[in-house]
Amino acid sequence: MEIFLVYHKINPDFWSEPDVVPATDLEYVATVHANDLNGVYRATNNIDMDWQLNPEILKTADKKSFRSTSVGDVIVAIPHNWIADDIKVYLVARCGFKEIKISTKEVPSVQEMD
């Protein structure tokens, strides 16, 4: 199992699949413990219950509720070694996931994990 950070687009359009996403367009929503990106996606969708109640959710942002993760949202894979150069960022695409870059060197809201 790995740690993933989930960010939702503040103003989602659900169609675009850019190669770079500005950090200012993203809102941290959750820290998830999952095997892979598909597990993160599944854990952050309202299927049988509010996704924030799923056991894979380690932490959520301070907000009452969030929509399900969808196209245009971002998932950050945190490596076991916590080396910043090994962090990978993925966009939820219309079909699967696409590796992208965030337009800042900092991963937004990582400091909020504590």
Image: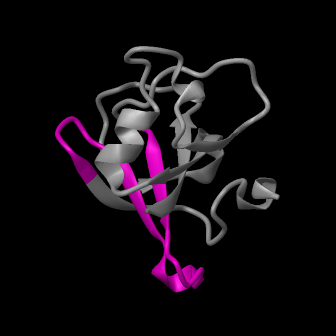
Q: In this picture, which residue range is highlighted in magenta?
A: 73-97
Foreground: 72 or 2?
Answer: 2
Q: Is residue 93 magenta?
A: yes
Task: Please give the name of the residue rendered at 41% of the width and 45% of the height, measured from the top-left corner.
Answer: 40
Q: Is residue 99 left or right of residue 54?
A: left
Q: Is residue 69 magenta?
A: no
* x then y, percent, for residue 28: 65, 42
**Quadrant position of the C terminus in the picture:** bottom right
* x then y, percent, for residue 97: 26, 50
**Quadrant position of the N terminus in the picture:** bottom left
Foreground: 16 or 48?
Answer: 48
Name which quarter of the figure residue 98 lies in: bottom left
Task: Please give the name of the residue rendered at 76% of the width and 25% of the height, measured from the top-left corner.
Answer: 63
Above or below — where is 97 with respect to 82? above
Name which quarter of the figure residue 14 lies in: top left
* x then y, percent, for residue 61: 73, 37
Colour scheme of the rendered structure: one colour
Q: How many marks?
A: 0
Question: In this view of the protein, can residue 56 be seen by the observer?
Answer: yes
* x then y, percent, for residue 96: 21, 45
Q: Is residue 101 left or right of residue 37?
A: right
Question: In this view of the protein, can residue 18 be seen by the observer?
Answer: no
